[in-house]
Amino acid sequence: MKQTKEVSWFYFFLGLACFLIPGSVAVFIAYDRGISFAPVLMFTAIVIWGGLFWLFPFTFGRLGKGKKKVTFDERDQLIHKRSVMAAYVVLWLYFVAACVTAWCIVGPHGSISVNVMPLTLLGGLVIFTFVQGLASMIQYGRTDKGEKS
């Protein structure tokens, strides 16, 4: 298996675990004990990390430039850009669906609790990471096509 494909699998599972576990804990603490500094700070850190998580392959691919072995070539960069674009499109569809669904449930004169907003944001981060990883896996394919590790 090519190294970038292995890294893609790693980011796929790491990203989902990094958002689901601490994000769920922060939201649960906020709902159970009320809003306090610790869960809000934890949730803010997760959101900031989530916004920048897709940049990791670019930055780590650039760190190894002094070596002669190429680990992140043009094909990998194109796959990464396409997977980020697919995740971006699905993220917008998710937010549109969430807004329209909430509006249909409460009606034009109803109100929605602001407690729904962190769950919607966390769901968006998880969906973005999941779709990006899935799109990368689909583009790399299930089998190696003559590539050497």
Image: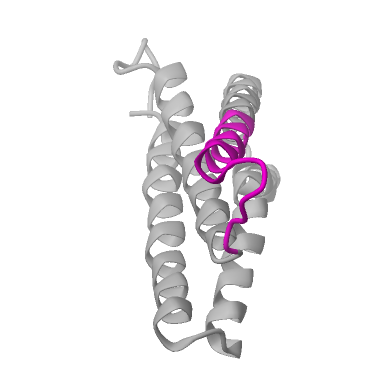
Q: Is residue 44 left or right of residue 136?
A: right
Is residue 110 depicted above or below 97 in this figure? below
Q: Residue at x 62, y 56 (%)?
A: 111
Q: Position of residue 23 (x, y in %)?
A: 46, 66
Q: Magenta stretch: dominant SS?
A: helix
| Horizontal side of residue 145 vs 99, given as left or right | left
Q: Which residue is depicted at the point 46% across and 71% down?
A: 27
Q: Magenta stretch: give its range.
A: 92-113
Q: Residue furthest front?
A: 109
Residue 116 is inside the magenta segment: no
Percent of width and height locating residue 103:
60, 40
Write the residue at 43% across / 20% down: 140
Q: Is residue 99 above or below residue 53?
A: above
Which residue is rendered at x = 58% and y = 54% of the image?
121
Q: Quadrant of the N terminus?
A: top left
Specify the farthest residue to the left.
143
x and y percentages locating residue 21 in the rendered image: 37, 65
Instruction: Identify the image quadrant of residue 6.
Output: top left
Say how the picture is coloured: one colour
Total count of labels: 0
- Looking at the picture, tell me which residue is in the foreground, 140 or 88: 88
